[in-house]
Amino acid sequence: MAEIRKIICAVDFAEFSPQVADYAGTLAKAFQGEIHVLYIVPTMSQYVGLQVAPSSIENFVGEIISGAEETMNKFIQDHFSDVSVQGKVITGYAAEEILRYADEQNMDLLVMGTHGRKGIDRILFGSVAERVVKSSPIPVLTLRPKQS
């Protein structure tokens, strides 16, 4: 029988993230598991060669990370009061970092949202969820936002 003890809950702190957290929390309670809430800060390394000082980019990324950590703490407090949970803010490319974390931490399941983009938006922005699903060695539960 499959064991689901360690669950990644990958979020972007958008308005749909609480729905993703609800599913992850429900699964963690059902299987007496733990949740690792993961937020990826986009890398800014592609801007280093432009007319922007590397120190400015590093300061900007540092501020984003600091803000993300504060948001993570509040998000965990608001959505995971009765389950074992830890939050992690990582810098990098979202799909790659999610997959790396899952491997390094020996996770059992990944829960994440998908924006359900179509057409030109999908071409321009891509799909982190699609890349994760195609490459993940562990099961992935993807959730689309509920239409209001």
Image (cartoon, helix red, strand yellow):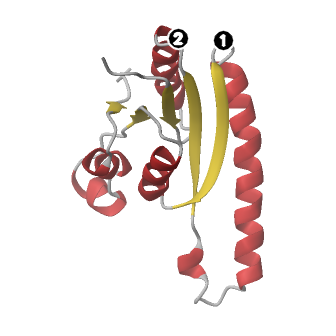
115 or 62: nearer the eye?
Answer: 62
Q: Amino acid at mark 2?
A: Lys
Element under disc 2: helix
Element under disc 1: loop
- Disc with the residue nearer the chain's start (2 vs 1): 2
The residue that appears at 52% across and 38% down in the rendered structure is 11
Read off the residue under disc 2. Answer: 29
Q: Amino acid at mark 1?
A: Asp
Q: Are marks 2 and 1 in contact (CB under 8 Å)?
A: yes
The residue that appears at 57% across and 27% down in the rendered structure is 35
Question: Could you tell me which quadrant the N terminus lies in?
Answer: top left
Q: Which mark is residue 61?
A: none
99 or 22: nearer the eye?
Answer: 99
Measured as percent of width and height from the top left, residue 69 is found at 73, 44
The residue that appears at 54% across and 25% down in the rendered structure is 18
56 or 131: nearer the eye?
Answer: 131
Measured as percent of width and height from the top left, residue 119 is found at 21, 53
Read off the residue under disc 1. Answer: 82
Measured as percent of width and height from the top left, residue 141 is found at 34, 30
Instruction: Tell me the distance, in whole angstroms, between the alpha carbons under discs 2 and 1.
Output: 8 Å
Taking the image as shown, residue 34 lies to the left or right of residue 148, namely right
